[in-house]
Amino acid sequence: MFKYFNLEKTYQYLLIMLAFFLPITVFGANLMVVIICILWLFSGNYKSKFHEILNNKLMLASLIFFSLHVVGLLWSEDLIWGLHITHKMWYFLLLFPVLFTIVKKDFIKYYISAFLMAISITEVLSYLIWFEIIPPFKSATLYDPTPFMDHTAYNPFLAFAIYLVLHQTFFNNKLKKLEVILYSFFSISMTINMFITGGRTGQIMFFAVLAILIFQYFKSQKFKAIVVLLIVSSTIFFTAYQSSNIFQHRTDSAIHNIQNYGTSLIYKNSSIGLRITFLINSWELIKEHPILGVGTGDFPSEYSKINSTKSPGVLDTSNPHNMYLLVLTQLGIVGLVSFLSIFYYQIKWSYLSENKFIRDVGIALPLLYLLIMLSDSYLLGHYTSLLYIFFSAFLYKNFDKP
């Protein structure tokens, strides 16, 4: 069936296209994913594929995490919602293992280049909207110019791209002078773009990016790293606060909503107030079902019961906007341990890598996601889930092992 074309090269072209489509189009990225998975499922050599998957602890952790969602359907009353959540987790069952078996070491630079090129395009379009050169489109507005996706996903994408660009700038000694200038320019322009858009989680992720990079740069000089981090981060924060209306407004509103959380339903139903309420009410669910949770499909109904009693007048939710709370309420401590094991194996593998780029980025990716998942369920959303899975597929593969 595949004798008339080179399947391995086809995979690589599709992966490069997928990397490019990640921040731009849901349809394009999904199309690449579907084509890749179909080719993989019908390309044979199953014994070798399954051997590679089952002999990798990260892949096993991913499969177990998905399987727990299936098992969690057994004590779910709302099977329809349970199947919906299980479907959201399919990346961990199929896409992650599929990508893991087809990525190639020699093409990593092309995956990353395609991704950064796409981010550059979104950044340019964001500025064109902000300067009113082109009209806003899709999710973008003049106030919050985030093209192609809303700011909850756009800013984390931007923060991760900034990490990749800055890492190249500071650690890649093979860069030519012109390339250093180009990388430096884009790191500055993307940093400015970070603060003219409204994604607070991505902005927090940006400061975490600075911290990780500075500690990686001053690896054996912890005190110096702390001093540099304090100077750089405070300078950027206060500059952004004084010069960006949207950053100043969203920073002030977050502080104001926290300070006045208990005084009015208006504050409890704000973005920050809702997250506080989700945390409080979800904890009640966790205390009632600590080991196995309420089941894969029953969070919305069980949360609504507690919300109507503990916080009447506050909006219900189907998602506590915190990945740890979601896993704990659905699958209990068993689910959370399974979930965290994925990040444990990523960090453990990265520390053992001899390649500095793979080691540094391999540690940064899980740390950044572990941070931002405190404010939203980022492995439920299409864009951020696919970003995480795509980069994980090649950052944690031993290419030297036959």
Image (cartoon, grey):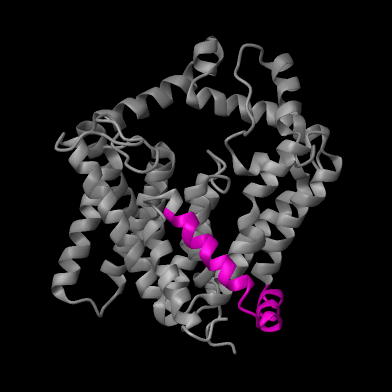
Q: Quadrant of residue 305?
A: top right
Please tell me how many numbered marks the rendered image carries.
Answer: 0
> How far from the left and from the top, in percent, is residue 340?
66, 55
Look at the image and tell me whether residue 7 can be seen: yes
Does the magenta portion include 55?
yes
Looking at the rendering, the stretch of residues picked out in magenta corresponds to 28-56
Q: Quadrant of residue 358?
A: bottom left
Examine the rendered structure and indicate whether residue 14 appears above or below residue 236.
Answer: below
Q: In percent of the image, x 36 and y 74: which residue is there?
A: 109
Look at the image and tell me whether residue 237 can be seen: no
Does the magenta portion include 385?
no
Which of these two is toward me, 136 or 376?
A: 136
Which of these two is toward me, 96 or 345?
A: 96
Q: Is residue 192 left or right of residue 230?
A: left
Q: Is residue 101 left or right of residue 358?
A: right
> How far from the left and from the top, in percent, is residue 371?
51, 48
Q: Residue furthest bottom?
A: 402
Q: In percent of the image, x 37 and y 42: which residue is there?
A: 203
> How far from the left and from the top, in percent, is residue 377?
57, 42
Q: Which quadrant, please, contains the C terminus?
A: bottom right
Q: Quadrant of residue 201?
A: top left
Q: Main secondary structure of the magenta part?
A: helix
Examine the rendered structure and indicate whether residue 173 appears above or below residue 384.
Answer: below
Examine the rendered structure and indicate whether residue 198 appears above or below residue 212.
Answer: above
Q: Which quadrant, please, contains the N terminus?
A: bottom right
Q: In percent of the image, x 53 and y 67: which residue is there?
A: 36
Q: In percent of the image, x 36 and y 24: which residue is there?
A: 252
Which of these two is toward me, 111 or 4?
A: 4
> How far from the left and from the top, in percent, is residue 50?
70, 77
